[in-house]
Amino acid sequence: MTRHSETPTDDDERMDFEDAIVSDSEASADERIETDGGVGTPFEVVSEYEETRRDRYRKLYDAYVHAPISIIWRDWRARIGFTIVAIYLLMGTVGPLFVEPTSVTEGPALAAPFETMEYPLGTDNQGRDLLSQTVHSTSTILKMVLSGAVFTVGIGTIIGSIAGYKGGMTDTVLSSITDVFINIPGFPLVMVLGLMFDDQILGNPFAIGVLLSIASWGGLARAIRSQMLTLREESFVEASQAMGIGTSTIVFKEIVPHLMPFVVINLTNAGRKVIFEAVALYYLGILPFQDLNWGSILNQAYGANAHARPDAIHWFLVPMFAIVFISVGLTLLGQSLDRVFNPRVRARHEKTTADVEGDGDGETQTQDAMGV
Amino acid sequence: MILNKYASTMVTIDWRIRRLGQAVFTVWAVITLSFALVRMLPGNMMGAMITRLARQGINPARARELVEYRMTIDPDAPLLPAYLSYVSETLQGNLGQSVFYSRPVVDVLAEALPWTLFVLSWAVFISFFIGISIGALMAYWEGGKLDIGLTSYAVLMGSIPFYVLAILLLIFLSYRLGWFPTGGRQPIATDPGFNLTYISGIVTHAALPVLSMLVASGVASLGMRGNSIRVLGEDYLRVARLRGLSDITISTQYVARNAVLPMYTTLLISIGEMFGGSIVLEQVFQYRGVGWYMLSATHQRDYPLMMGGFMVITVAMVIALLLADLTYGYVDPRARRSQ
């Protein structure tokens, strides 16, 4: 077995780098006496192909687009997860076109679910249709998830990778800031800030996403930093430095792509966390709201003592189901992504996946720091 | 190389002190942030309090005095002296006066804190115990029926926000079945003290809040499952088998130990989330802990009590994380080197 057949997923840059070393040492290698019955060592293997630009793009496509999607699709979790998330996307975009908005005293108070076609999920104590409320909440929630997840992961990745790569004083400062944010309990902080900035937040779901991300980027930044510490010792980084490439190019164009799997997995976790926290804030009645959303439905239900009334239980269950179902989808998606990208999970399954080309990279140690 | 060696020995000597420094730094940052929110930022709490008092017909000078007494920040002093005196008051344990209760904030919260810690420590302990056991089982029978069943359980638990479970438990176990009290933190009609009815009353009141936090066991078990599977793929296990070590030795000394240790990160994150989550949890069960007071202060615009609650929750969490970090160094020698 040669080294190359064991690691078919080596990066292009590193291959080039190794090839260069090989050709330098070729002369001396030729003169060596073979003591192992003539079996070649990997250091004598010279690349047989010239790689064109097109080959390279094809390889990149295979490694980062085709292979992950085909692996993901083989996993049942991913299929379910994708489907659930797609349902919510449809509900948030075209759902409001099909389901009419509801208003007070539209139907009888506290109609039970699954009895009339007019109010399939029942009504609340003011006769508002719960299905319509749930569907019309979706787009608001999705906007929060989008901005919250992007901001959390964006800030976490930028701060963590700069801290890990630069080291020294920069690292000390950025890590201290990160540690402060990890040590402050996120929810109370968001609660106080939400109260202070309620004017800016009212009717702007994107702002709520940003607000929620303030308290939750710390864990990711710390995880990214520790991976950066390993990655910056890699030979391709040294090569880039020797070539005089600028720091930001090395960090964001050379190294961060290696962390992408980890980052993508954390997007789903961050999205789930945004939903949980946003709904909690609305449930507690801290954030002002114009349009109903899942959290404010829960808030009104609790306020109307629906938990003590046997005929009102669907008022809780409908928004709860909406929350749990989307987070099941996000969890499954995150898990299947973890399976695809996480080489340490693959360690035991190496034989079954070794035939798939370019699924992730060998050095990233995807930690379960964020939960799933 | 020499420099590296030197640096690493420095780290091993110093990390406890550095960790302590980090905790102090966090507390300082929170005090500063709270000062900024109360006094500096546009639309700050002080302005709001003074306006409200003035609207109640209290003359402006008296209103400013009252606010200074309640918030321990002088609204008229220049920023720096006001800041310094606020920091020193806070460090001496003076968090101001609650508007609603007309008592020092510290008194209100000191009475509530043990209740919160009681619930949270049991929640952390039980959910991690269950999570780690389930995770180990899943990894052992990986791919089997039990694994699929337990993984579905874990995914579902991880997808349910704890407050949703809390409301469901409240509806079904308290209101429908009447097994547990519907709210509060202690039985009403018994004398507080060391007697059986009182203690069992406390336990039944805390039971549902603790059970709601079991959702954390889902995340923990998935983490444990992943870690165990990773360890099972390691070469040193093959070596251990070749050495002829017994299955029990391998599973307890090799697999379990190495798989449990990285769970520490998950544990820290859950402690953080539980401290933050105590606000929602205590609201659902009307459990008068620190979170409940902070929330009711928020609704009543009782800013001193609200900021005090924020401060107390933060300090409690900083101390909890500090203790966890310091003790972890003894459990896992690798942690000391990587700090």
Image (cartoon, grey):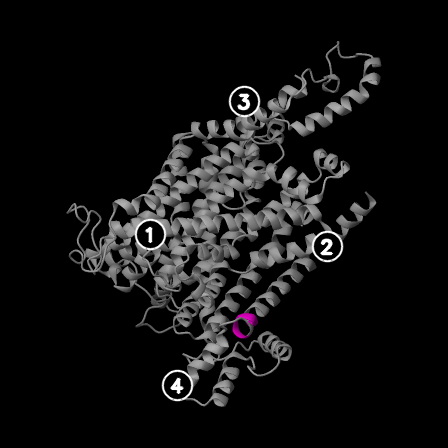
Residue position marked by numbered label 2 in the rendering: A169
Quadrant occupied by the N terminus of chain A: top right
Tell me the subunit letter for badge 3: A
Q: Residue at x 24, y 61 (%)?
A: A308
Which element is circle 1 on? helix
Tell me the subunit letter for badge 2: A
Do labels 3 and 4 touch, CB within 8 Å?
A: no
The reply to whether residue B227 is in sight is: yes
Pointer 3 and pointer 1 on the same chain: yes
Q: Is residue A145 left or right of residue B34?
A: left
Q: Residue at x 76, y 24 (%)?
A: A20
Q: Nearer the viewer, mark 3 or mark 2?
A: 2
Q: Disc 4 and disc 2: Cα gap in Å?
A: 52 Å
Q: Amino acid at mark 2?
A: Met
What stretch of residues is rendered in magenta? B35-39
Q: Disc 3 and disc 4: Cα gap in Å?
A: 76 Å
Which residue is more in the foreground, B66 or B337?
B66
Residue position marked by numbered label 3 in the rendering: A351
Name the disc covering residue A137, or none.
1
Q: Amino acid at mark 1?
A: Ser
- Relative to B55, residue A122 above or below: above
Which element is circle 3 on? helix
Other residues around mark 4 within 10 Å, as few (<14) / some (14–19) / many (≥20): few
The percent coordinates of residue B101 (x first, y second) are: 41, 79
Labels 2 and 1: the sequence-earlier one = 1
Q: Amino acid at mark 4?
A: Gln
- Relative to B51, residue A1 above or below: above
Q: Nearer the viewer, mark 2 or mark 1?
A: 1
Q: Nearer the viewer, mark 3 or mark 1?
A: 1
